[in-house]
Amino acid sequence: FFFALPPGSPHGLSEGSCPCHRLEAHSCVGTVPTEPMVSTTSQKMSAKVWGSSDGNEFNGLVHLFTDELTSCQYDRQIVVYNQLIKKFPDGFFVRHGLFGVPEVMTACTQRVDEGRTEFLGPLLNLLEMCAIPFKFLKVADGLQYKQCVLNVFTCTAQALAVANPKVRLQALATLKQMVASIRSKESDDLNLLRVQKESLGENAAKAGGPQGTGLKSGSTAASSVGGVLSATGTGAKSAVTIMQYNHPLTSRPDEKLRYSRHSDLHESLKESILMDTLLHELKQDLPPDQQAGVVATIRECSYWAHCCRVLANAGGLDRVLQLMDTWEFHDQQTFMALEIVWNMLELNPTCREMIGSFHYVSVLQRLLRGCLVYGYKLKDKELRNDTVAVCTLIAEDPDNHQYFFKTGFTEMLCVAAVGTEMGVEHEVLKPFMQTISEEDFEFKKLTWNLLYHLSFFRENAFLLRESGVLQTMFQYLDVECSTPEVVRWPTIQLLDLQFLALNVISQLSLDGGRHFADANGAPILLTFLRECMDLHLRNTTLRVLVQLANSENRTAFVDANAIESMLELITVELDLTVKRDCFQMISDLCAGEGADQDLAREQFFHNRGIELLIPYLEVDPKNLTTQHLLYTIVDCVWNAILGRQANEDRFLELRGVHKVLDAVDRAPQFIQLCMLTCLVDFFQRPDAVAQAKKWEHRTKHTPIEKLLISLWACAGGGPADPTAAQNLADFQARQKDVDTTGITFSLPAPAYRKGPSSTQHLDPSALHTLDPDGPPPGHALDLLAEMVNSADVRTKIYCLFTHIGLQGIDSLTFDERRQLAEIRQHVDNRKDRMWEFVEGSLKDQRCEPTSPDKDKMHKAFEERSQRHKKLQNDADVFRQKEYAWLDEAERTFYSTLIKRSDDQEAMAKRTATGLTITQAKIRKSEMLKASFQSAQNQQREQIAKVTAAASMSISRDGMDPGSFMYGSLGETGPQPKPASAPGYSSAAGLSPALDLRPQSSPTPDEGLGNLGPLEFDSLDQLGVLDNIGTEIPASVRAFADRTSAGLGGSEGQQFLSETEYGIFNALKTLRKDPASFIGKLEVMREKAVEEALTDQSQDPTTVREAYNNAVAGLNLAIPQRPIKNTPIGITLAARDLALSVGLKGLSSAEGLLDMGTETRLNRYGTVEGESVDCTCYARRSPDEIICQMLVTPGVMDSLFNASHKYIGVGVGWHRLSKYVCVVTLCNNYREKPRSIQQTMHERFVQMTLGAKEQRAIPSPSRA
């Protein structure tokens, strides 16, 4: 129909623009042809338009716009477009967004930009339709949704380049609605940040509000001491992000946010040109309606961290604040702009530095003042609250505090926050803005929280104190307050305000002692602590008291008798954290020297504080809470007891020194350091030293010397100063989610309290010339004072030994005597380290000492070398004495064992042989002696032959024949001969342990590292099984086989058999992960109940209850470090018990001679501390064995005992139960030489196998 239109008509084609101008003139203009000229493209387009809906409907219209023959047919394009739009009244499909809609929108945009006004309606219609979310025609369209949105974003943003205001407004509305739809489908970054903070326990976030509006209906923010509080609210911003002060984010939030699934829509927003286009429009001078549209669209985008970062980097934040300065507070743009600033401050913390300036804070002050002075609507109250919330985010950066003071913002905020309570008349105080409504209550909390942040700036804090803010805050805590402005608040709201009041008081009172006293703060806080019914609020009050007690307010608290209140709370409170805080406050009030401190110590004495403190020294520091409590108790002993004669006397009357020594034994090292410091000060009193000498260990019954020597040996394994202890405790608390905000670790390295005789002059070289066996002279205290101030555990131990005596006691072992000799040389060793430091410093600075200094250093080094040689010689002497003692103990043991065996055997054979007991003993002794001499002669002959042959070979090589026996060991003593050598003929498969080394040969323990693992125990149990006279199943033989499996990394682990190593691995798993055995226990419970029902040997109810108790115990068990030390001596001791009870068919070791745990362990080494045996019968697999042990009463505590660091496992055959397993645990263990272990075990096996038939009970088959 368009061919009949004249050229130049509104709906026709011009001559110059016709793409068909190459045709005949009559074909286009002037005449109408006889046959219509319809192109092939038009036919295809019509077929597509009227075809089925397959997502390709826009293909024909796109061809109509792009084809050269039809690109000028504007009316045709509009008609086809209108017909096509009617088919999609509810929006387009995703495929249309991939191809079709973007091309059509771009073409319409170009034509409108060229002046074709007839395309204005279709373009506006198309932009409006694109605001509707695209629909899925097929499921596979979800994979292309991102590209669809990206295409529409791009073409819509390009429409903003059109000069037509209607197009620009509609394009901005479409973009805003599209971003809002993305927020409704995908969680924005602000919502993710809120969820992340809630998961971390920070209840501070903000949620998105209704779409399409720029209003916020309310804000809520509050914080408590050391944390953040939040209260519920409604509207666009339901909570304000108020982080703990001085803990800003260290990285961008968008770098830490993790989506629950990949957000294609968010990626499309990032990849589009939308933000660049909006920033360009924001910087232009636009009409108000278009400017509002740009701000509204940016507001929707600001909920993503990426958009906030782009805005900040491109200067968008500055532009928004500049526009806010030109708008009135009641303008719609102001609400949206303030929310943009809020989102940027929360999602991009670097904006807090960018916005920190005098001008920008002035803009916010003007905005807040306008709301307070001229606002009267609910919307104005919401804007007022949001403005304070934004200022709080800005105030989180301490560098911005000065601008609040310089602009007068702090003064105006102070009047708005507490002016009503103070009775001030000001323009910002309007009656209808100071009600108890939800909005005004939120404003009160927001302003108080902002005051807390601003009070960290000195000028702001001074202004607030002088303005009476501190007195107003105390009115809210005064239980007797009757001020109408205070008592008008409901109870729930009043609790929130009291939390915030404590927050502000804790900061303003630190340097405001005068204002604190004028406000009668100490009595008000103590009364509020006693009368407060809310537990959380009471604990917060206690934290504030602890914080203020260590400031210039100490006098006020002492005058108010705060110590009595703390002791009362300790008596009635069960929470250990509260007790810790109370003791901490008492310690802080008594710390230092002065009249106030003396009065505090006197109050502590008269209120029976010492009697209350003593029992808490028995706290077991098994977790961080009890460790902090014990640390605070020690701090309280140092500050509240030491230094006052009456307190010290009462402490000694209650055997306080014994309690401290008991606590030293179980405390961590950083607490031990503080305890030793207190003991050094106590030991200046002779009665304290006398009491310490009477102390004995609770379980070992050892004296104080052994305790101090053990601490000396373990020194250096942990933090040795309170700062390191604090850092370690904080790290462990973060790992285990334990609160440590209340512990201050305030115990410093205290000044040594000098005695009456400490004023005499002391030569620094005097200490190392003292008689080690005599008492310390009085003039040594000055040097000890310098040493005790250091954070060195060993120095403090030396000081304690100086008081109790360095001569030692008879009960010390040889190793302890060696360490005591090292303690005597401690002062000289410290001097040596200083000389080494001087030498190293001179070398580092490339300085050459003068001749006198060089001679002095050389003399010091020679003295050090002589002392080290003497110390080494003393150690060798102690070692020789130790081996002599071990040999004597071995001979005594075997002589006693042989005597008992002979008595029993002689009595049994007396009737058969007719010999008396004496005759039988003589005969037995002669036989053993002859057998021993024969074996000894054979071995000597063999050694002589091998030595002679080797000497001839070595002499040919030019080697010293005397080095043959020990040269291969590196002077470590004789090696055991291989099993294939002649003369290898002992009952257990080893040559007799004969000491054939010369007198000058090295001691046996020096060669332990070169000796291979023991291989002599594989025949013990198998030999028994072959001679018991009954048939043993193959499964029992496999279980009792003790052949070394060679598994594990250490020598002791490789010595274990396959069964024993499996049990050892199961024990490691149990200590590391107790919960892993709960399922196994439940399976074993059903099996054990069925067994009890079958054989009726036990009550099924009792069995089930025992397993249930074990499951409950594992649920409460604290994981421990796996035990990896498996000395061979402990394994042999466990095997000995398994062999003995198995042969006799016993269920325990009771009644067996010389089979106690310590006796067996000392047979193969030296055991220190607690030792215990855990046995299991009739179970074969490692898991079943462990489960059976867990059910046994008392065994679970032994398996999870953290002090047990050494383990041994032994298995064997049992005459009644078939299987027996023994697990032996101990605290500390030192092995004997391998040769001694070999001999001891060989003789034990010989004695056991030789008497098995006389002492064993009949087997079931024989019965």
Image (tube, grey):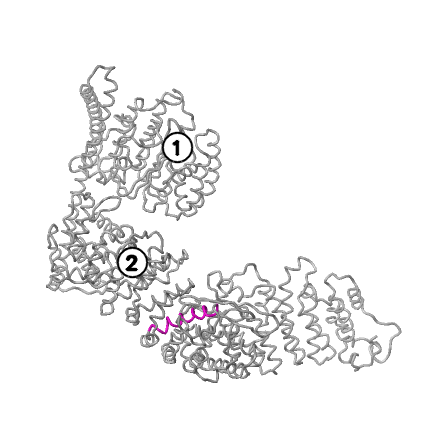
Residue nearest the viewer, comparing 637 with 301 = 637
Residue nearest the viewer, comparing 210 with 230 = 230
Element on which disc 1 rests? strand
Query: Which circle's residue, 2 or 1, is located before the other in the chain?
Result: 2
Relative to 139, say whether 518 is above or below.
below
* Residue 923 in view in this figure: yes
Q: What residue type is labelled 2?
A: Ile
Residue 201 lies, in percent from the top left, at 46, 61
Residue 633 shows which numbered tag? Answer: 2
Element on which disc 2 rests? helix
Question: Would you identify the image quadrant in which residue 480 lies?
Answer: bottom left
Q: Which residue range is magenta in the image?
A: 492-510
In the picture, the quarter occupied by the C terminus is top left
Residue 67 lies, in percent from the top left, at 74, 70
Relative to 77, say whether 860 is above or below.
above
How many C-alpha atoms fall within 10 Å of the one at disc 2: few (<14), some, or many (≥20)?
many
Question: Would you identify the image quadrant in which residue 1010 lies?
Answer: top left
What residue appears at the point 76 percent right and 80 percent down from the top-left corner? 16
How many C-alpha atoms fall within 10 Å of the one at disc 1: few (<14), some, or many (≥20)?
many
